Image (cartoon, rainbow, N blue to C red):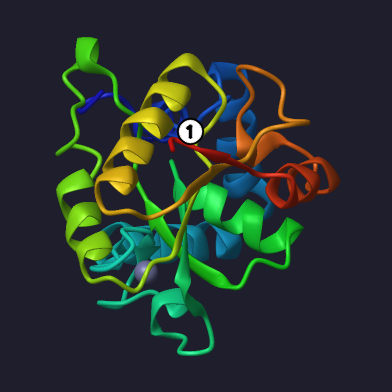
Amino acid sequence: MPGAPLLQQLIDSFCCLPGVGPKTAQRMAFHLLERDREGGRQLSAVLLQAMDDIGHCQRCRTLTEEALCQLCANDQRDDAQLCIVETPADVLAIEQATDYRGRYFVLGGRLSPLDGIGPREIGLDQLAVLLAEGRVQELILATNPTVEGEATAQYISDMAAGQDIPATRIAHGIPLGGELEYIDGGTLAHAFSGRRKVGF
Ligand code: ZN
């Protein structure tokens, strides 16, 4: 790509976005160049700053430019409930769909031994430290209902059992193989409130 005309480099760069193929990328590039250069400059400035400055919350691992995210820094949230999700997008989905007032922990993936993703890669050593603090009284397992998401939930419920912390699993209404982020709010709210005890 380096060395190609700048226009082609711009089109190729848009192709890194999910769901964007060459045709859409081309349309985006032409739109910015012909109709919205100011929007394009704004996009590139914010994009650069976001890529440089947004990291992960030291406590829950969600995305934030601060040391602690807004949810972890909020002392009105309930330390007794800890909800385990796979991605920062899942945090948003649950915040928007439910009246949950507890805390979160973001795995940033799911156990997948064949891909070399073990407990450490999804922060379970950090989660163990959090659980050992003794404030969590309910662990809510909101990983996706995929094979790997279920295996991850099982692994974490065993960790919780080792600390005598009850674990619940969100369940009904979420289609097998579904992703929380794409489920409508009503279904997610129902699944969240209908969580069942797991483990022991
Ligand atoms: Zn946080």
Nearer to the camera, 79 or 70: 79
Q: Is residue 8 above or below residue 138?
A: above
Image height of 159 relative to 16, above or below? below
Left or right side of 92 for 66? left
Q: Quadrant of the C terminus?
A: top left
Q: Quadrant of residue 136?
A: bottom left
Amino acid type at image mark 1: Leu
In this picture, residue 145 sits left or right of residue 59: right
Q: Is residue 53 visible?
A: yes
Q: Residue at x 22, y 46 (%)?
A: 123
Count of numbered labels shown in the rendering: 1
Residue at the image point whose x is 48% and y is 33% from the top: 17
Specify whether 7 is left or right of 26.
left
Based on the displayed image, in which of its 4 quarters is residue 8 positioned?
top left
Give the x, y percent position of residue 92.
Answer: 59, 57
Up-down relation of residue 65 to residue 199 (above or below): below
Report whether 51 appears left or right of 190. left
Q: Residues within 10 Å of mark 1 (few under 14, many from 20)?
A: few
Give the percent coordinates (x, y) of residue 61: 31, 58
Query: Which type of secondary structure does the marked residue at label 1 adopt?
Result: loop
Would residue 141 be seen by someone viewing this image from the given angle?
Answer: no
| Residue at the top extreme, as displayed | 114
In x, y percent, where is residue 157? 38, 39
Q: Which residue does the numbered mark 1 point to in the structure image? A: 17
